[in-house]
Amino acid sequence: MTGVQTCALPILITSANTEIAPASGSASNDVNTETEETEAGEPDGKFTYSGYFDTYYFANLNNPASRSNLGSSGISRGFDRYSGQFQLGMFLSRMSYSFKNTEVVGEIGFGPNAEYGSYGNDFRYRWGTVVANSTYSAIMIKQAYMTMKANDKLSFTMGQFGTHIGFELIDAPLNFHYSINNTFNAGIPFYHLGLKANYVVSEKLSLMGGVVNGTDNINDNNRGKSFIGQITATPAQGLVIYFNTIQGNEGNARANGADTASYFGVLDIVATYQLSERIGLTFWGMRGTVKGEFQGSSYSAEAKHWSGANLYVTYKVNPVFSIGTRLEYFDNKQGARALLTNGNGTDVKTVTLTGNISLADGKLTLKPEFRIDAFQKQKGALGEVLPQQFADADGNFTKSSQATIGLAAVYKF
């Protein structure tokens, strides 16, 4: 799930999912072609190419027989899914072309994380692109959109773009921590396809609003559209607050084309504060609600909720090394989302400690990371032993928590 952003790591705080910045996954030192004059004296447009590649190795202290971090839910981790083995993340190529007040951006991803991040377009989902249109190419498109600036304050964007909701992103260079948290992975959308407008009211306030097919799927599963919105406020120096939402009907239409009376909505707040040159603080909180269906899920007559709360603290030791921690609580006890234990609703507390080692003038970042996830223990009514979230060395789900430790390498260009 990502916003449209520039890459600025290593930094004290990463940006929230804002909607105006150039593009997600682009490096701060993009290789650009300079504007040139044609024979007629007309300026040519500017072409930019950039991207990144990431890879990792993590050990799981539970030593699960499957060598998987996914747990019984199948989504206990987002991208760093495997333990005890070297793994690829994503090779992302970003291309953009701008001319006068217009720009087109395309991001093509290859590798496991490209597939995980575009899961709604995977052939395994009956409403996805492969079944509907007999093509796999949509899986590789991370973002593809056009932007037109009507004037200095108003701009319009149309196409597929990363979500504005939340603080964390799909792109490894844009997050301080390598592993994505449960709130991002299980709580909010990854991307949308639609039209949005951004209006800069002043230096301290900007507004975004738009309509999209839905969430995490380029094909609309019904005739309705969802509304997306964002308010960005800068009330004081170093403090930026984002209010985000998506509201709409995400239930599948019936065979006769009629939409079901379903509802899907997320309310979200991100506040970042640069306490000093070295210390950065961020709070991210969200609450989601679903009633009826969600993209073909089982029907629920009663509204179900889920929520997440996250606190990030980063400290820049020197220009080469920074360290940060993430404290998270994710509540899915009503079973509204897919992060379940033994098929039941659950909650999870997570602590992550990550270092950022900047090499080669910031092009290469090494990220050593230690993470603990502690899920609610499953207990039977008569005290019987129930399967837990994580597997042990014998392949039995006897563990309610897991700890992983390892290293990721991220190269941006």
Image: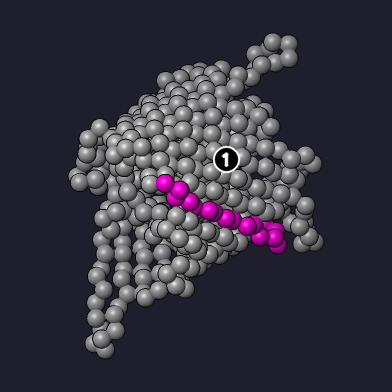
Q: Position of residue 275 (x, y in %)?
A: 36, 37
Residue under the image location 40 percent in, 36 percent down: 281
Q: How many marks?
A: 1
Do we see residue 196 in this rendering?
A: yes
Tell me: residue 83, above or below residue 196.
above
Main secondary structure type of the part rendered in magenta: strand
105 with respect to 381 (left or right): left
Q: Which residues are magenta?
A: 220-236
At 54% from the left and 38% from the top, the residue drawn is: 285
At x 54%, y 29%, the residue is 329
Q: Where's residue 74, x and y in %?
A: 56, 34
Q: Which residue is found at the position 56% from the left and 35% from the top?
A: 308
30 and 313: which is toward the camera: 313
Label 1: element kind: strand
Residue that lies at the very extreme toward the front in this rendered image: 236
Q: Is residue 111 above or below residue 47?
A: above
Residue at the farthest bottom position? 40
- As drawn, the residue found furthest toward the top would be 383
Give the image quarter of residue 106.
bottom left
Residue on which the image places disc 1: 286
Is 226 covered by the magenta stretch? yes
Depicted 235 relative to depicted 45: above or below: above
Q: Quadrant of residue 105?
A: bottom left
The amino acid marked with disc number 1 is Met
Dividing the picture into quadrants, the one containing residue 325 is top left
Q: For this view, does 64 lie left or right of residue 42?
A: right
Point out residue 36 in the picture as x, y percentages from the top left corner: 24, 77
- Give coordinates of residue 127: x percent, y percent: 64, 54
Residue 228 part of the magenta segment: yes
The reply, left or right, for residue 307 in relation to residue 181 is right
Q: How crowded is the residue under tag 1: few (<14 C-alpha within 10 Å), some, or many (20+)? A: many
